[in-house]
Amino acid sequence: MTRLQIVEQIFTKKSYLCVGLDSDITKIPQHLLSLPDPVFAFNRAIIDATRDLCVAYKINTAFYEATGLKGWEAMEKTAHYIGNDHFKIADAKRGDIGNTSSQYAKAFFETMPFDAVTVAPYMGEDSIKPFLQYEGKWAIVLGLTSNPGAADFELKNVLLKVDELEDEVHIAKQLTPYLYETVLQKVAEWGTPGNLMFVIGATRADEFTSIRRLTPHHFYLVPGVGAQGGSLKDISEKAMIKNDCGLLVNVSRAIIFASDKEDFAEKARSVAKEYREEMNNYLGKSVIPARQ
């Protein structure tokens, strides 16, 4: 799916909601467990209930890989069931040496019909490039994550070197960016705003203004709204791009596990609708593209 197609979906549906299918078999409604493929049955019901309210679905592959072959089959069936009208993200967090990354890219972009894969950047350019070689496909690179462990590396200052120090205080501020800021700037050189996004956690709202300055044209996949406490309002006000929106805000547990009873799909739709209505308010402050 191209950037233009994503943007058209956003303004047509008045939504930048991504529904996360973190379909933990231990949490899905009990009445589904007797079915041949309970995870796929659960996903299908969630998709049917939310497809007009969101522009993307994110499948967290860990919840499928954990159950072996059946999980992979459920994941593949789910990706095909979503179809081509939604942006399909494999949240796999891959990243390895080039020839290995090439096989990961082939798995998700050729064997399975995903539009994007989340990837880790810390092995460098050759670990990311294979995901950027496919027309209409995306690498979504981990930028600033919402987990507490982000403080271990991402939020550490990096000391850069210069030959001359004329103003030590001023230069010290310029030369000690956070590691994630250095990563964002470097990774942005490897792709384009048409095939490269960044994961920015919603609980890092204070950082969004500076992040947008660093990467003014890239889309962000934003997890952490809902159960993790991120503010949709703060994110939208600080990071939205006029005309293109530039955001895909992921909500997983708050939507898909809104109920563990037989009304789970109805409740999921209700919560997703609330998010869509709030997003519509923020999009109203943006500029709808002339092509619409």
Image (spheres, rainbow, N blue to C red):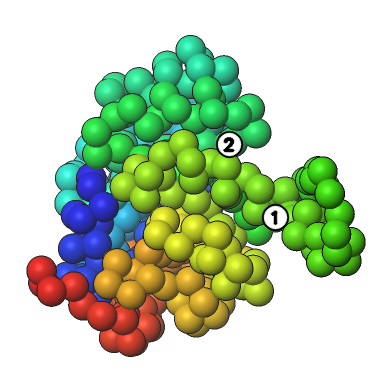
Contact between marks 1 and 2 (CB within 8 A): the answer is: no
Q: Position of residue 210 (x, y in %)?
A: 60, 68
Q: Is residue 101 above or below residue 35?
A: above
Q: Position of residue 21 (x, y in %)?
A: 42, 50
> Would residue 36 be visible to someone looking at this image?
no
Residue kind at label 2, given as amino acid type: Ala
List the residue tagged with mark 1.
Answer: 147
- Front label number (1 vs 2): 2
Q: Position of residue 287 (x, y in %)?
A: 26, 80
Marked residue nearer the N-terminal end (1 or 2): 2
Q: Residues within 10 Å of mark 2 (few under 14, many from 20)?
A: some
Q: Which mark is residue 94?
A: none
Residue kind at label 1, given as amino acid type: Asn
List the residue tagged with mark 2.
Answer: 120
In the picture, which quadrant includes the C terminus? bottom left
Q: Give the spatial CA distance, label 1 vs label 2.
A: 15 Å
Quadrant assignment, res 46: bottom left
